[in-house]
Image (cartoon, helix red, strand yellow):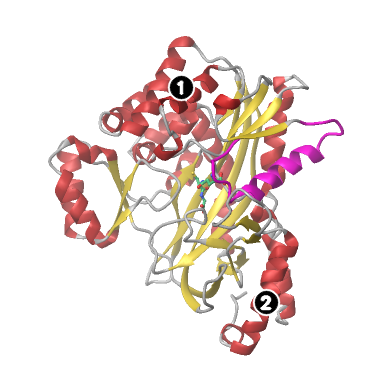
């Protein structure tokens, strides 16, 4: 099996027609975003950015990523229940990174008071790229795991039909039939619904905590509508961008689609609100310790020898399976090991990515900028706000990135595969632990960083090869 052949990619007349077909198909399927000018109105909306064609992904690697997801769910959940591990892993980071420190303070307070809710709901997305070497080998490497506001499970449920249609119109029936079904919205909602049911109060609402500007509302709406579809009765869902405005209704589940960046906390009151939610009986998705389990520092510590073994003491094959997806990850803690990391990074910055403890995309540091940043902090504790990771290098593939008002041109593209995980734990019992779908995102190779929300990547589908 192959990707899209050049005779199609280079046929300019055909491409022009297909672009119109594709945009209408996206609108018809509801692959939508609000526009930048009016981010809180649905009067004028546009298609969410997407690729004209699906991108090739080797089948073995795709299956490998799917098979890992329930183990990653378990790992994240175990980390969240291990205060000693989190304390030790994050000690150097919270000493210098104010945002992580504030989250950690809430986590400590909850530990002291005791958790108010034994139902845990985890909706995450583990992201990977292919490390493709000159010798033709490809290996799956994890970029990161998102344990808060993992997005695009809604829109990616609708993109398969867009690519199927485009390929059919292009006369590529065989490729069209190879586009996989995908419905993360359904599985994410199944977990949300399970948590709501376990909470056990018909009148309690599911609260979507969203950003003040809501361009990505349709991605949220898919989840919301899936939730309503499950019940004959009235299900209450509310959208709030400031939890302080909750108007007296009991909240069963708080689904965070906000709260992952420092800018999301506009004042001290926002931090008070986060604490209030953590203390409440509502099921938090994620709770504060699961949020912390998704930090880059935890990712780096997990790659140290013996750490995965601690979480899976009797499952060496699971340890091996997970570890196989780890790229080289290096500490910048003060001491000889961290000094070695600094020297290594300065000697060959193009081989690495410098990652601060930030989410939302566009925060990582590459190339000569790594040297600038490291030169400034290398002799101080400030460097412990970052970790260093090997840069993953996939082969570029040509495709057309369709984005409102952007000129049409062929681009060299890199793709990132995300796998959605959903789990619910009630006390000690895992009552649900599933892999619920995938998300392929593709960007021009000119950009080293940034997702769809950050305006860099676009939605895509894997074409298994
Ligand atoms: N607040 C927006 C939403 O909830 O839809 C964006 C959230 C966001 O940026 N989430 C990150 C993500 O999944 C994880 S923290 N980004 C994927 C992308 O933008 O491509």
Q: Is residue 110 left or right of residue 191?
A: left
Residue 20, which numbered label? 2
Q: Position of residue 51 (x, y in %)?
A: 58, 69
Earlier along the polypeptide chain: callout 1 or callout 2? Answer: 2
Asked if residue 313 can be seen in this view, the reply is no
Residue drawn 42% across the image and 21% down it? 106
Vertical comparison of 460 with 3: above or below = above
Residue linked to disc 1: 272
Q: Position of residue 120 (x, y in %)?
A: 59, 26
Give the SS element for disc 2.
helix
* Magenta-span inclusion, residue 223: yes
Residue drawn 71% across the image and 41% down it? 224
Span of residues in magenta = 209-235
Residue 198, which numbered label? none
- Label 1 crowd bin: few (<14), some (14–19), many (20+), radius 10 Å: some
- Label 2 crowd bin: few (<14), some (14–19), many (20+), radius 10 Å: few
């Amino acid at each position: 099996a192959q990707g899209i052949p050049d005779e199609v990619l280079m046929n300019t007349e055909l491409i022009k027609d297909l672009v119109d077909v594709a945009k209408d198909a996206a609108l018809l399927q509801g692959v939508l975003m609000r526009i930048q000018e009016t981010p809180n109105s649905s009067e004028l909306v546009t298609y969410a950015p997407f690729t004209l064609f699906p991108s090739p992904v080797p089948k073995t690697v795709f299956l490998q990523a799917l098979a890992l997801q329930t183990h990653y769910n378990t790992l994240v959940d175990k980390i969240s229940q291990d205060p000693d591990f989190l304390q030790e892993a994050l000690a150097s980071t919270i000493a210098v990174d104010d945002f992580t420190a504030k989250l950690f303070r809430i986590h400590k307070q909850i530990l002291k008071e005791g958790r108010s809710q034994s139902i845990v709901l985890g909706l995450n997305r583990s992201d990977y790229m292919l490390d493709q070497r000159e010798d033709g080998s490809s290996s799956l490497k994890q970029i990161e795991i998102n344990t808060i506001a993992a997005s695009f499970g809604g829109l990616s449920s609708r993109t398969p039909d867009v690519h199927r249609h485009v390929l059919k119109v292009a006369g590529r029936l065989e490729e069209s039939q190879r586009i996989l079904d995908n419905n993360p919205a359904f599985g994410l909602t199944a977990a949300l619904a399970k948590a709501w049911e376990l909470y056990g109060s018909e009148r309690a609402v599911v609260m979507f905590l969203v950003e003040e500007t809501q361009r990505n509302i349709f991605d949220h709406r898919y989840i919301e509508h899936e939730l309503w579809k499950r019940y004959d009765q009235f299900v209450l869902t509310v959208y709030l961008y400031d939890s302080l405005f909750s108007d007296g209704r009991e909240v069963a589940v708080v689904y965070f689609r906000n709260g992952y960046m420092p800018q999301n906390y506009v004042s001290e009151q926002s931090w008070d609100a986060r604490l209030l939610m953590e203390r409440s009986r509502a099921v938090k998705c994620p709770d504060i310790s699961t949020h912390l389990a998704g930090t880059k520092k935890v990712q780096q510590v997990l790659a140290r020898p013996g750490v995965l073994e601690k979480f899976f003491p009797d499952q060496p094959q699971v340890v091996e399976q997970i570890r196989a997806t780890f790229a080289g990850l290096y500490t910048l803690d003060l001491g000889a090991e961290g000094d070695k990391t600094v020297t290594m990074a300065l000697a060959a910055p193009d081989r690495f990515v410098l990652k601060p403890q930030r989410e939302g995309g566009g925060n990582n540091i590459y190339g000569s900028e790594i040297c600038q940043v490291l030169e400034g902090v290398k002799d101080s504790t400030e460097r412990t706000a970052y970790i260093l990771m090997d840069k993953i290098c996939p082969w570029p593939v040509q495709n057309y990135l369709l984005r409102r008002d952007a000129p049409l041109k062929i681009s060299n593209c890199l793709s990132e595969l995300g796998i959605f995980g959903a789990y619910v734990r009630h006390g000690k019992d895992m009552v649900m632990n599933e892999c619920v779908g995938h998300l392929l995102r593709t960007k021009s190779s000119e950009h080293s960083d940034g997702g769809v929300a950050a305006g860099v990547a676009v939605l895509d589908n894997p074409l298994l090869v």
